[in-house]
Image (cartoon, rainbow, N blue to C red):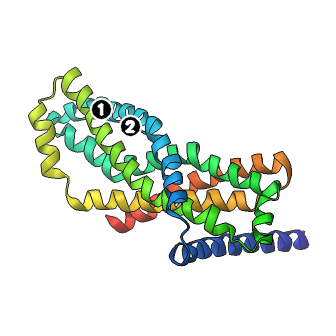
Amino acid sequence: MVQALGHTTIGIVRDLGRIGWFLLYSLYMIVRRPGSLVHVLKQIRFIGTKSLFVIVLTAAFTGMVLGLQGYYTLTKFGSEGMLGTAVALSLIRELGPVLAALMVTGRAGSAITAEIGIMRITEQIDALETMALDPFKYLVTPKFIAAMISLPLLCAIFDVVGIYGGWLVGVKLLGVNPGSYFYEMEQSVVWRDVYSGFVKSFSFGLIIAWIGCYKGYYAGHGAEGVSKATTESVVLTSVIILVWDYFLTSVLL
């Protein structure tokens, strides 16, 4: 039993060291050899542009649910005019960055892991190393840069669409005064709220690219190895995003 415990502990420490080294080396390569602009733009299109539909759809219904639930909560206190503030602050500070990151994780993060994992099991990464070409320059750093650029932009779109989703339900369906909806929102939302949302989305983009590329880069052999790496990537990224969101919230409050 002691031997099994020691073996497990050594394996966990080894994996933590490897994943930490992967992140540090990726950040170092971003500064030193970030890759071509064409590769970065291609990844921005894949991670950002192709995620727009799911982001807009999720944001619209999230804002509508917030508007509906917020209205029935605020009516108990006679504060229906604060609905815009409740919707905007909920989206900008928390739900926008987190839900946008989770949607991108499911759509793009899994694809990143599968793409690099397939290149690993078909020995394409080994071929790049044999030709003295750094795989990080061509495969990893463009995804890191694209994710860190795309997530704040997607978060901004999520916030705007969600706010108008809440407006649609609160003003058009439930009869909240449109002037008070936007006026109270303007008075309550400050730059610190917007700043904290963008900081979160930027760090979430880094996490998505980090875990997705790492799991793909060290994927096991065969189709089973790639499928396992993809599943682990989505689950681990989602958990880390939620945990990291708590720590960032406690710091940025």
Regarding mark 2 in the picture, which secondary structure is present there? Answer: helix
Hey, what amino acid is under mark 2? Ala
Other-residue count near label 1 (Cα within 10 Å), few / some / many at <14 / 14–19 / ≥20:
many
Disc 2 to disc 1: CB gap under 8 Å: yes
How many tags in the picture? 2
Q: Earlier in the sequence, mark 2 or mark 1?
A: 2
For the residues marked 2 and 1, what is the alpha-carbon distance in whole angstroms? 8 Å
Regarding mark 1 in the picture, which secondary structure is present there? Answer: helix
Position of 183 with respect to 103 (left or right) is left
Hey, what amino acid is under mark 1? Gly
Rendered location of residue 177, percent (x, y): 11, 30
Residue drawn at the location 27% of the way across and 48% of the way down: 89
Which of the 4 image quadrants contains residue 182? Answer: top left
Residue behind mark 1: 165
Residue drawn at the location 38% of the way across and 35% of the way down: 62
Residue behind mark 2: 59
Front position in the image: 200 or 30: 30
Residue 174 visible: no
Give the vertical position of 55 relative to 225 (above or below): above
Give the vertical position of 29 relative to 248 (above or below): below
Other-residue count near label 2 (Cα within 10 Å), few / some / many at <14 / 14–19 / ≥20:
many
Rendered location of residue 168, percent (x, y): 25, 27
Which of the 4 image quadrants contains residue 212? Answer: bottom right
Residue drawn at the location 65% of the way across and 71% of the way down: 22
